[in-house]
């Protein structure tokens, strides 16, 4: 009798040992743990409680493996061991006061206000569909100005209620207040235009002195540079119509219409 009982137990142990490697998964609260998990815990009323210890106990762990996870009671958070150091999981103690963003790491505050104030931004200004990227642009924008785009320092700096204007480059459409449909591309293009509409200026300093002129097309470095109130002109070329004070004129080519 004793031999039969011993044999049964040996057979049972053998079968268990044989099966364990084939089903090396553990399910808590489930008989079918997910095939991708070594451990799956299922519950709708409780959680998983991981190792808890003080900061001193955590740092005293001998030869911790990368990925080792513990809950530190002193710092009230999870820490993971990575790249030869313990790192707290997530951003802790993040506060925002005015323009100052403070991140407290190990008791040391880092003030990011200078980065926020001096770094270029892409934000939606007030009004409908207004966007700007850069420093000091669209600073005066009001809720009555719509669908303007300013990219570059001082671009569309003075806009108040103008619509459908685009400024790409330093000081483009800088003084524009209520004009509409103006496109300025290039450093200081259409810089002094205030209430003009439907002007196109592409190139450095094109139409820089234009104030109230309308429906001008100025293409090329300093094209129409000194034009102030002229309208319906087309100047194409390097310094084309540079000193011109005219209306309904067409100058094509470098220095074309110089002094007109």
Image (cartoon, helix red, strand yellow):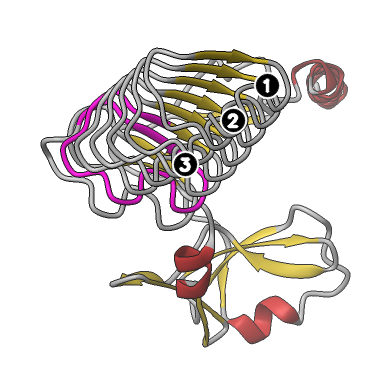
Q: Give the mark nearest the N terminus, 3 or 2.
A: 3
Q: What residue is drawn where x is 19% and y is 37%?
A: 178
Task: Answer left or right for 98 relative to 234.
Answer: left
Badge 3 vs badge 2, beta-carbon distance below 8 Å: no
Along the line of sight, which residue is nearer the eye, 57 or 201?
201
Q: Is residue 97 above or below residue 227?
A: below
Q: Magenta includes 43?
A: no
Query: Which residues are the magenta region?
Result: 146-166
- Whether residue 7 is visible here, answered yes or no, is no
Q: What residue is drawn where x is 86% and y is 18%?
A: 18
Report which residue position mark 2 lands on. 223
Question: Mark 3 or mark 1, which is nearer to you?
Answer: 1
Question: Mark 3 or mark 2, which is nearer to you?
Answer: 2
Q: What residue is drawn where x is 38% and y is 46%?
A: 192
Along the line of sight, which residue is nearer the eye, 176 or 53?
176
Q: Main secondary structure of the magenta part?
A: loop
Report which residue position mark 1 lands on. 237
User: Crowding at label 2, few (<14), some or many (≥20) Cα neighbours within 10 Å?
Assistant: many
Task: Answer left or right for 162 relative to 67.
Answer: left
Q: Is residue 16 above or below residue 28?
A: above
What's the CA distance linking mark 3 and mark 2?
Answer: 15 Å
Report which residue position mark 3 lands on. 172
Along the line of sight, which residue is nearer the eye, 30 or 252?
252
Tag shown at residue 115: none
User: Crowding at label 1, few (<14), some or many (≥20) Cα neighbours within 10 Å?
Assistant: many
Quick one: SS at disc 2?
loop
Q: Give the mark nearest the N terminus, 2 or 1.
A: 2
Tell me residue 9's x, y (percent): 79, 24
Tell me residue 207's x, y (percent): 48, 35
Residue farthest toward the left in the current orientation of the protein: 144
Quick one: SS at disc 1?
loop
């Amino acid at each position: 009798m004793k031999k039969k009982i011993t044999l049964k137990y040996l057979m049972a142990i053998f079968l268990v040992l044989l099966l364990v490697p084939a089903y090396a998964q553990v399910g808590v609260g489930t008989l079918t743990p997910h095939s991708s998990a070594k451990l799956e815990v299922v519950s709708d009323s409780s959680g998983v409680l991981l190792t808890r210890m003080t900061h001193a106990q955590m740092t005293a762990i001998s030869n911790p493996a990368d990925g080792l996870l513990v809950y530190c009671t002193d710092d009230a958070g999870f820490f993971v061991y990575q790249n030869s150091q313990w790192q707290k999981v997530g951003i802790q103690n993040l506060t925002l006061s005015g323009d100052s963003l403070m991140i407290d790491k190990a008791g040391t505050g880092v003030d990011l206000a200078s980065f926020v104030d001096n770094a270029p931004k892409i934000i939606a200004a007030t009004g409908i569909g207004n966007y700007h990227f850069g420093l000091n642009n669209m600073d005066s924008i009001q809720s009555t100005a719509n669908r303007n785009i300013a990219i570059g320092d001082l671009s569309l700096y003075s806009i108040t209620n103008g619509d459908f204007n685009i400024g790409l480059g330093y000081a483009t459409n800088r003084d524009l207040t209520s004009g509409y449909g103006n496109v300025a591309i290039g450093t200081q293009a259409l810089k002094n235009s205030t209430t003009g509409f439907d002007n196109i200026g592409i190139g450095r300093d094109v139409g820089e002195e234009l104030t109230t002129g309308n429906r001008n097309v100025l293409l090329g470095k300093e094209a129409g540079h000194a034009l102030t109130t002229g309208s319906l002109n087309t100047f194409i070329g390097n310094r084309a119509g540079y000193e011109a004070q005219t209306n309904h004129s067409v100058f094509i080519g470098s220095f074309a219409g110089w002094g007109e």
